[in-house]
Amino acid sequence: MAKNKNIKRLEFPEKGKSWNKINSELNQIEENDIDWKNGRSPLYVFKGNEEANQVGEKAFMKFFHHNALGGKRVFHGVKKLEENIIDFGLDLFKAPSHSTGTITTGGSESILLAVKAAREKMRLKNKNFDQYNIVVPESAHPAFDKACCLMDIQIKRANLLSSRKVDTHHLESLVDKNTMMILGSAPCFPHGVVDPIEDLAKISTKLDLWLHVDACVGGYILPFFKMIGRKISDFDLSLNGVSSLSADLHKFAFCPKPISTVFFKNNEDLERSKFVFDYWGSGQFETFTLSGTRAAGAVAGAWSVINNLGKSGYIEIAEKLSSMTDQYVSGIESIEHLLMVAKPEATIINYTSNTLDIFAVAEQLSKKKWLPGLTKRPKGIHSMMSMYHFPVLNDYINDLNEAVIYVSKKKDISSNLKAEY
């Protein structure tokens, strides 16, 4: 980030400092952070339960000095942990025996690898044409834009239905001979709804297209929502037509950052996603990730959290999360002027107003020390909740009600806020 030329830059420290001094300075530096530990942030942090948090932190620090890049040659234990995690995911997502996957540093990297693999497969079909395109829902994550920007791929956007799910008929109409991928989200980030993956899978099968399921948000919680009886449509690798699936462990698997997974229905597609170079003097350089060096602490933390919670632990958290989400929705809908943008299927809520400027309500929430997440189409207030938000449920609903009453009593009050992630 560019700095103002009039601001004096810091000089590199001349002498070292003790941990006590450093720790004191770190505490001061984070003093102005949003109070995320007490549920005041609508995103970025996730909690299942306190024990899992502590287990993940301890395991991360145990492998603090390890480098996951060296798993094949040095850190054989890290490689084993990664293989175990991939097996856990393949089982959870009902993958066939010929499926595989890899660990990444986050959802954006997982998505980029899936797009790269789809592009390499497309090149086998059409070797003389490079202006490929992908067709995505309007609600698709910007990581797909990033991938297309990096690989010079065109991106087409399909309309959403009133349910905020993708209009599959419109999506199919955008497909042409140069389309290399279509996708659906489980759920989409802005509205918290699962796209009709089964219908998209039928389209991909009919047209012989790559279908990617972006389950970065919901991958590691929606299966457990299904297990407790929540109505979640199928979205996993058991569906004929699904080629790849991304799912973040550092979201609703409650693992330390940064770690995600991407899975491929067929083994050869993992090979298409990897990078292999052998020109420099040090010999062949091969990675299944865009990143080289990776934090092995995140791998150890993820393995440990999954084993600490097990299926029973995730089911217990799913019951609490689903109940909490229902209570938030009920509380919001009980407030005059407010309505949900869509019926949430995970723990993402998005609500708006047909009578008030909802961003003006957001400004009032900010004054009460809440950080409001915002959406621009439609204008709404957005939260991706975890168990950090349960203790403050009543406080939030009460403050929201007061904010709405304040805005409703002012004539033509509006806000200049802009939605940003």
Image (cartoon, rainbow, N blue to C red):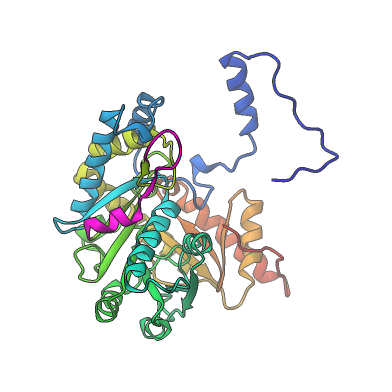
Residue in the image at 40% along x and 26% along y: 64
Query: Compared to 213, does 132 lie above or below?
Result: below
Whether residue 92 appears in this view of the structure is yes
Query: Compared to 125, does 80 lie above or below?
Result: above
Whether residue 327 appears in this view of the structure is no
Q: Percent x, y for residue 360?
A: 66, 65
Look at the image and tell me in which quarter the C terminus lies. Answer: bottom right
**Image quadrant of residue 20?**
top right
From the viewer's perspective, tell me whether residue 155 is left or right of residue 407: left
Query: Compared to 195, does 67 lie above or below?
Result: above
**Image quadrant of residue 269?**
bottom left
Residue in the image at 37% along x and 83% along y: 172
**Image quadrant of residue 207?**
bottom left
Residue with the most extreme left position? 97
Q: Is residue 282 magenta?
A: yes
Look at the image and tell me in which quarter the N terminus lies. Answer: top right
Residue in the image at 29% along x and 34% along y: 72
Q: Percent x, y for residue 45?
A: 46, 45
Foreground residue, 72 or 164? Answer: 72
Q: Percent x, y for residue 212?
A: 34, 65
Query: Compared to 205, does 299 lie above or below?
Result: above
Foreground residue, 207 or 324? Answer: 207
Looking at the rendering, the stretch of residues picked out in magenta corresponds to 266-284
Q: How many marks?
A: 0
Q: Is residue 324 magenta?
A: no
Q: Percent x, y for residue 402?
A: 60, 60
From the viewer's perspective, tell me whether residue 292 is left or right of residue 338: left
Residue in the image at 26% along x and 29% along y: 76
